[in-house]
Amino acid sequence: MMKGIRILILSREEAACLEMSSYFREKKYSVIWCTDYDQAERLISDEKHRPDLFIFDLDIPSGTEYDVMRFVQSYPEVRTVILSGDDRLKSQLYAYSLEIDDYMVRPVHLDLVEAHLEAILRRETRRESASKTVGALTVDYDSNRIYLEDEPLILTAKEFALLEYFIRHRGMILSRDKILDSVWGFDYVGGYRSVDTLVKKLRAKLTGKYPYIRTVYGVGYCFDL
């Protein structure tokens, strides 16, 4: 499983949404679902709620469903998986022509759906650089470790996720809401104190020599050199 990954599930059938959301939440994914196509498009277009993975559950695709797929093309960072009762070759080929990432014909076990999702995410990870250096910090994505002046920082999983998130968003002012959604997941029920406490711990580990995490009063934080 890949914790912290955000999934949006879209299906006209509420029962299908509930079944899949329950399964993936148990696997520690962050999940949101809807049965309305317009709502799904709003969530994808909103950077705060944009998912990493989009599961589109449909029966026989028609013009409306194809419009949704075309819409998602505008957001290439969102990986799309189609679950469909349509096993026709022409339907699958057309869906792939709209740059989806996978097409699975129902019925399909959710364990297999999860395996396909993780395969997609692994491919994405391999496309990224194996390491990223910002100032005195280096993120090694192969080992999931962060080094400060070539010495490994001893970090919890959540500390690693937050520091790596800051590094990826260097120079951006990040609200506490955005940090909570991106690092803890938008189904997290905790408050801002979780962010502030973890930032305090990271600052202690970076020491006063590297004051990279700056407080933006009334908003959140900004990571910069």
Image (cartoon, grey):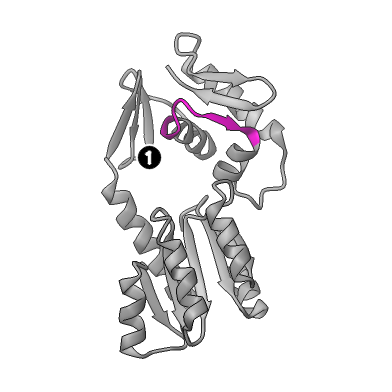
As drawn, 190 above or below 53: above
Q: Which amino acid does label 1 sit on?
A: Asn
- Identify the residue at horizontal 40%, vertical 53% (top origin): 77
Looking at the image, residue 75 sits to the left or right of residue 13; the answer is left
Q: Is mark 1 on a helix, strand or loop?
A: loop
Which region shows up in magenta?
A: 167-176
Residue 128 appears in the figure: yes
Q: How crowded is mark 1: few (under 14 residues within 10 Å), some or many (20 or more)?
A: few
What residue did someone put label 1 on?
144
Q: Image quarter for residue 69?
A: bottom left
As drawn, 66 above or below 210: below
As drawn, 99 above or below 218: below
Looking at the image, residue 95 sits to the left or right of residue 211; the answer is left
- Identify the residue at horizontal 42%, vertical 67% (top origin): 70
- Identify the residue at horizontal 29%, vertical 35% (top origin): 131
Residue 96 position in % (x across, y down)? 32, 73
Q: Does the magenta stretch include residue 172?
A: yes
- Identify the residue at horizontal 47%, vertical 88% (top origin): 85
- Return the residue nearer the eye: 14 or 192: 14
Query: How many numbered marks, from 0 up?
Result: 1
Residue 55 position in % (x across, y down)? 50, 69
Q: Is residue 183 magenta?
A: no
Residue 109 appears in the figure: no
Residue found at the far top of this picture = 209
Residue 224 position in % (x across, y down)? 45, 20
- Quarter of the image with the C terminus in it: top left
Residue 57 position in % (x across, y down)? 52, 77
- Return the residue nearer the eye: 4 or 61: 61
As drawn, 213 above or below 5: above
